Every structure is written in structure tokens, then in C-alpha cells.
């Protein structure tokens, strides 16, 4: 696949999008992703939803709410064909992590290269017949909603917050009132709608329709603190009891001053070089973790086959369903893949993986000075992908 233009209106620079729209305002990008048109049909996605290893959800909606009964029903994978028998008129099937099944689709992340790779979550598809939807809701993450097949009417309303109330007793987060509708348009195949976090939205299938959500993610403090705790457990210096000033106090009391003195030392440690290292490592591990299990690649490949493919024009690229990233501290580069620190790479391997993490398409010539078996290992680990020319 040749390089993919950015998914932005012609007149907009990535800098402008990030400053004016990102996490602030929705944006319609007409024909932002024309590559999606004709890539998949509804049956392809139904087939995928039935795969044993797929992360899929089937959502059905009764025509109206009957006293006390939930209006919506949710069934999570594994889904079987019988789940699709006798469906009500309104239903949707959702499949997550599509880049793991289709590297060609994963490549479309290149259209969002203005978002760093580590903030990409996954591509999810929703298939719904006419009238299907997942209800009025908001998400905590940024999402680019790309129409792949058929058309969907999108309405956008108010920004929500943690006090927004959801409809009680439903298996998904839904609400009735989206406030004032600020956007109401039908998206056709190839059109893309950027929706910032917490903005209420409602998408109604106009006909048999596939919508691809390019979802982003951000770490939360719970994940970072959890990862810091794991790292700290292996640092024997942190095991040494702290020295604390003693003040007269009742023997049963844990004084606020004592807690403060401990807090001061904790914050001092976090602000020291050791703290920098712990935080850098914790953040890198968290944001490079995969959300979904790795599937075993079907294609059997060995080093000779890889070299032959490269010699006939294939390229090596980062695999979009895996997480490969690096950070720089002074002149030191540290690489992480899928939550793991890569600590046995030489300079050439580091340089090559950095280029791949940055989205380069590498050829046989770029492998000079590197052991092909090492590159083969990266392929086997799934960090990189061999893109055969069409
Ligand atoms: C959908 O594709 O129907 C739902 C996607 C979303 O609302 O985030
Ligand atoms: Co949503």
C-alpha cells in the first residue's frame, strides 16, 4: 500500500487540528478515509464476530421498554450462529481490535499519524441493519468514526461529566437526553467524524451499515501507580526503612506530622533521578501494553522466506496491533514492546526498531549490519509485519 494521506480536511494542518479540535470540538471530514470504501462487506464482519478468538459483542434492542425489563440485551463473545437467529429488528454487532485480523485495515492508522502511536487503542467495527444503534452515550476517549459501508446518521449533543445519569438497569451506558443537538448529518462510506471525549453521540444505521471506530486511549493514574509499585518492589534501596523525626505523641496515635514526613520523603524520591527513572519506566510499560491477547500468526515464515520476500519488494513495518515505542533520556534510547523493556538490543537494532516505531517502511537495504535472525524474531513476536506488495 502506498503512503496514506492524513485524515484531515484539505485546508487543515495537523497542528491546527490538535490546537482547535483535539479533545475540544467535533469535526466532520468528508471523504477523510476513502480507502475504507469497498474494503469490507457486512458479511466479512459477521464472519469475524463468530471467530472463536474475536472480541465481539452482540447488542439487541427491544422495540420499547416494558415495565421493569431492560430494553437492551448484551451478549459477549464467543458468539455462535444461533445468536443471530430470531434477532429483533434493531441490533448491532461490535468487533474490537480489527487490526489484529487485518493488517491492511491497521495500516489506515497512518491516516492519523498526527496522533502518537502509543495513544491509539484499537479499531472497532459496528455492523447494524437499518435502525440499529448502540444508543445515546458518551465515551471517555477520542474517537474517529469512519463510515465503511452504507450510511449512518450521527447526532451530537452536549458534553457530559461524571454526574451525567445513565438509564438504570441497562447492560450498557445510555442516556435519554443529549441536550441541544449541535450536529446532525448522514455519513456516507469514506466519511469520518471526530468525536472528542465526553461528547454525547448517537449513530443510527440508515441501511446495512459498517462503522469503523479508530479509538484512542490515555493512561490513568491507577495504571501508572500500579506499575510504579511493581517497579519499586524490585528496587532494594526503597526497602530501607525511612528515618523520621520523633515528636511526643500519644502511643496509640499516628500523627499527621509523621504522615507528612513520610509524604515529604516520598515526593523527594519521586522528584529525584531515581523517581524520574521509575516514572519513565512505569509510563512506558503502561502505554506500551496491549489491551488484547496476541493471536498466533497463521502465515508460517522463516528467515530465508523473509529475505526472499524482502528481495522481491516486501517491506517491514511496525505492526499496528502491537505496541512498539521508545523514549529518549539524554542520548540513551530505551525501547519497549507490548509492555516489556527491550534491554538486549545493540545500536543497529535499536536504530532500526526506532525507525519502525516511527512508521518507516524498511527494505532489505535497511537491514545492513543486522542479523536477519534477530529481525525474524521481531516478526515472530508480532512487533513488526511483512507487507507484501500487491
Ligand atoms: C457505533 O459504531 O455504532 C458506535 C461507535 C461509538 O459510538 O463509539
Ligand atoms: Co461512542
Image (cartoon, rainbow, N blue to C red):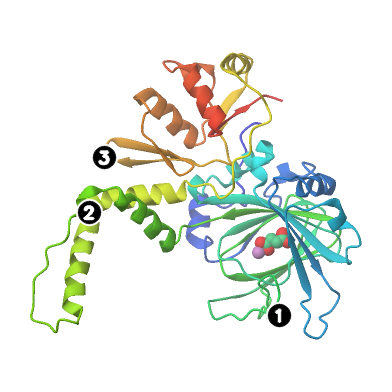
N-terminal label among 2 and 1: 1
Q: Image height check: is 342 above or below 269?
A: above
Image coords of residue 221 (percent x, y):
41, 62
Mark 1–mark 3 Cα distance, whole angstroms, equals 52 Å
Image coords of residue 1 (percent x, y):
66, 31
Image coords of residue 121 (percent x, y):
56, 51
Question: Where does label 1 land, which residue?
Answer: 176
Mark 2–mark 1 Cα distance, whole angstroms, equals 51 Å
- The quarter in which the C terminus is drawn is top right
Residue appearing at x 58%, y 15% in the figure: 307
N-terminal label among 2 and 3: 2
10 Å neighbourhood of mark 3: few (<14), some, or many (≥20)?
A: few
* Circle 1 SS class: loop
N-terminal label among 1 and 3: 1
Asked if one can make out residue 96 in the rendered structure from this viewpoint, the answer is yes
Along the line of sight, the residue nearer the viewer: 8 or 200? 200
Cβ atoms under marks 1 and 3 closer than 8 Å: no
Question: Where does label 3 land, which residue?
Answer: 330
* Circle 2 SS class: helix
Q: Is residue 233 left or right of residue 383?
A: left
Q: Image height check: is 383 above or below 313?
A: below
Image coords of residue 101 (percent x, y):
69, 40
Residue appearing at x 66%, y 74% in the figure: 182
Along the line of sight, the residue nearer the viewer: 219 or 253? 253
Cβ atoms under marks 2 and 1 closer than 8 Å: no
Q: Image height check: is 361 above or below 196?
A: above
Mark 2–mark 3 Cα distance, whole angstroms, equals 25 Å
Asked if one can make out residue 366 in the rendered structure from this viewpoint, the answer is no
Q: Quadrant holding ligand 1?
A: bottom right
Amino acid at each position: 500500500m502506498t503512503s496514506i494521506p492524513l485524515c484531515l480536511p484539505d485546508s487543515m494542518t495537523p497542528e491546527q487540528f490538535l490546537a482547535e479540535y483535539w479533545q475540544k470540538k467535533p469535526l466532520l471530514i468528508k471523504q477523510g478515509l476513502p480507502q475504507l470504501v469497498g474494503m469490507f462487506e457486512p458479511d466479512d464482519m459477521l464472519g469475524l464476530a463468530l471467530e472463536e478468538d474475536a472480541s465481539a459483542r452482540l447488542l439487541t434492542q427491544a422495540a420499547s421498554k416494558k415495565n421493569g425489563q431492560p430494553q437492551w440485551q448484551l451478549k459477549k463473545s464467543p458468539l455462535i450462529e444461533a445468536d443471530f437467529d430470531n434477532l429483533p429488528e434493531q441490533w448491532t454487532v461490535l468487533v474490537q481490535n480489527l487490526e489484529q485480523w487485518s493488517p491492511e485495515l491497521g495500516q489506515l492508522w497512518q491516516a492519523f499519524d498526527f496522533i502518537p502511536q502509543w495513544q491509539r487503542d484499537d479499531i472497532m467495527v459496528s455492523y447494524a441493519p437499518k435502525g440499529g444503534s448502540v444508543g445515546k452515550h458518551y465515551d471517555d476517549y477520542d474517537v474517529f468514526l469512519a463510515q465503511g459501508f452504507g450510511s449512518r446518521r450521527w447526532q451530537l449533543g452536549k458534553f457530559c461529566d461524571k454526574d451525567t445519569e445513565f438509564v438504570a438497569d441497562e447492560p450498557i451506558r445510555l442516556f435519554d437526553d443529549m441536550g441541544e443537538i449541535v450536529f446532525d448529518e448522514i455519513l456516507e462510506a469514506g466519511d469520518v467524524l471526530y468525536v472528542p471525549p465526553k461528547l454525547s453521540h448517537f449513530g443510527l444505521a440508515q441501511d446495512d451499515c459498517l462503522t469503523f471506530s479508530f479509538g484512542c486511549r490515555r493512561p490513568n493514574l491507577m495504571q501508572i501507580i500500579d506499575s510504579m509499585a511493581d517497579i519499586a518492589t524490585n528496587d532494594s534501596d526503597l526497602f530501607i526503612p525511612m528515618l523520621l523525626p520523633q515528636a511526643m505523641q500519644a502511643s496509640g496515635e499516628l500523627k499527621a506530622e509523621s504522615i507528612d514526613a513520610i509524604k515529604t520523603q516520598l515526593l523527594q524520591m519521586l522528584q529525584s533521578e531515581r523517581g524520574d527513572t521509575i516514572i519513565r519506566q512505569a509510563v512506558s510499560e503502561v502505554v506500551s501494553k496491549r489491551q488484547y491477547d496476541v493471536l498466533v500468526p497463521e502465515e508460517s515464515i522463516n528467515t530465508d522466506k523473509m529475505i526472499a520476500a524482502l528481495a522481491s519488494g516486501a517491506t517491514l513495518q511496525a505492526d499496528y496491533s502491537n505496541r512498539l515505542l521508545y523514549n529518549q533520556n539524554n542520548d540513551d534510547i530505551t525501547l519497549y514492546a507490548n509492555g516489556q523493556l527491550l534491554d538486549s538490543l545493540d545500536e543497529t537494532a535499536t536504530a532500526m526498531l526506532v525507525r519502525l516505531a516511527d512508521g518507516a517502511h524498511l527494505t532489505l537495504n535497511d537491514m545492513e549490519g543486522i542479523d536477519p535472525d534477530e529481525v525474524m524474531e521481531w516478526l515472530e513476536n508480532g512487533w513488526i509485519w511483512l507487507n507484501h506488495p500487491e
